[in-house]
């Protein structure tokens, strides 16, 4: 069953369709919240709250549009609400991020694996040093793999602005990583 059919069933009150949507989108919701907040507990709260809001407002959703940009907009707004409630500006640690799966050949190379883990840690540290708006656009494009149009919809900005902000964010991250990595080569 395609996404539009599941949404239509969920809008009609089908509990299994609602559950299927929640199961399908809980991981992207959690990962975005985690990448924006840096705290697994806060990310879980935001993801759950966002999914509940998503399911309770399905009646207002145009079922012919993709769900992910709409849901990630909710996640983004909920994460911002939580940050406002905390009112304490703290350094955000992205070290707690669950390692993303990576393709490997079946021959283990411990040295390469160690290098990759260290590089990944440095990248997350570098992301943590960016302004939240720049980190957000990088996460949406490079980690959530959303299109420019989907990011524009989530951030409520023109596509051209997405491209220019993404360019600046990548340039800033590159600069941060050059400072941090020293002897490492990306």
Image (cartoon, rainbow, N blue to C red):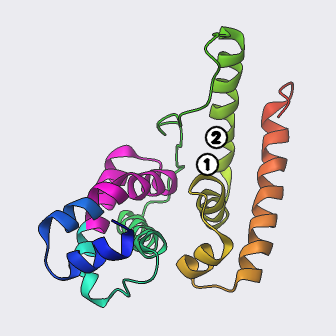
**Drawn side of residue 16 relative to residue 113, left or right:** left
Name which quarter of the figure residue 183 lies in: top right
Expressed as whole percent of the image width and height from the top left, the position of residue 131 reads 66, 61
Expressed as whole percent of the image width and height from the top left, the position of residue 87 reads 41, 66
Helix, strand or loop at disc 1? Answer: helix
Query: Relative to 41, is 47 above or below?
Result: below
- Do the residues bearing badges 2 and 1 touch, measured as CB atoms within 8 Å? yes
The residue positioned 63% from the left and 59% from the top of the image is 135
Bounds of the magenta span?
22-51
Query: Relative to 175, is 111 above or below?
Result: above
Helix, strand or loop at disc 2? Answer: helix
Predominant SS along the magenta part: helix
In front of the other: 78 or 65: 65
Expressed as whole percent of the image width and height from the top left, the position of residue 129 reads 66, 50
Q: Alpha-carbon neighbours of circle 2 within 10 Å: few (<14), some, or many (≥20)?
A: some
In front of the other: 179 or 16: 16
Query: In this figure, what is the number of numbered marks?
Result: 2
**Drawn side of residue 85 relative to residue 145, left or right:** left
**Drawn side of residue 72 relative to residue 43, left or right:** right
Q: Is residue 74 magenta?
A: no
- Position of the C terminus by quadrant: top right
Q: Which residue is mark 1?
A: 128
The residue positioned 56% from the left and 81% from the top of the image is 153
Mark drawn on residue 125: 2
Name which quarter of the figure residue 121 lies in: top right
Expressed as whole percent of the image width and height from the top left, the position of residue 54 reads 29, 74
The residue positioned 37% from the left and 44% from the top of the image is 40
How far apart are labels 2 and 1 at the CA level?
A: 5 Å
- Position of the N terminus by quadrant: bottom left
The residue positioned 36% from the left and 65% from the top of the image is 82
Name which quarter of the figure residue 117 lies in: top right
């Amino acid at each position: 069953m395609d996404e539009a059919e599941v949404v239509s069933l969920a809008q009609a009150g089908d509990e299994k369709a609602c559950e299927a949507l929640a199961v399908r989108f809980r991981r992207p919701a959690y990962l975005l919240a985690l990448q924006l907040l840096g705290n697994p507990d806060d990310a879980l709260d935001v993801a759950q709250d966002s999914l509940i809001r998503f399911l309770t407002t399905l009646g207002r959703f145009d079922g012919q549009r993709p769900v992910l940009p709409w849901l990630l907009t909710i996640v983004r707004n909920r994460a911002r609400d939580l940050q406002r409630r905390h009112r304490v500006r703290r350094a955000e640690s992205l070290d707690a991020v669950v390692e993303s799966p990576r393709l490997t050949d079946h021959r283990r190379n411990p040295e390469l694996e160690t290098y990759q883990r260290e590089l990944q840690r440095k990248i997350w540290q570098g992301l943590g040093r960016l302004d939240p708006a720049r980190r957000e656009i990088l996460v949406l494009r490079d980690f959530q793999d959303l299109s420019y149009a989907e990011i524009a919809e989530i951030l409520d900005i023109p596509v051209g602005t997405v491209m220019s902000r993404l360019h600046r964010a990548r340039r800033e991250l590159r600069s941060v990583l050059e400072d941090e990595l020293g002897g490492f080569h990306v």
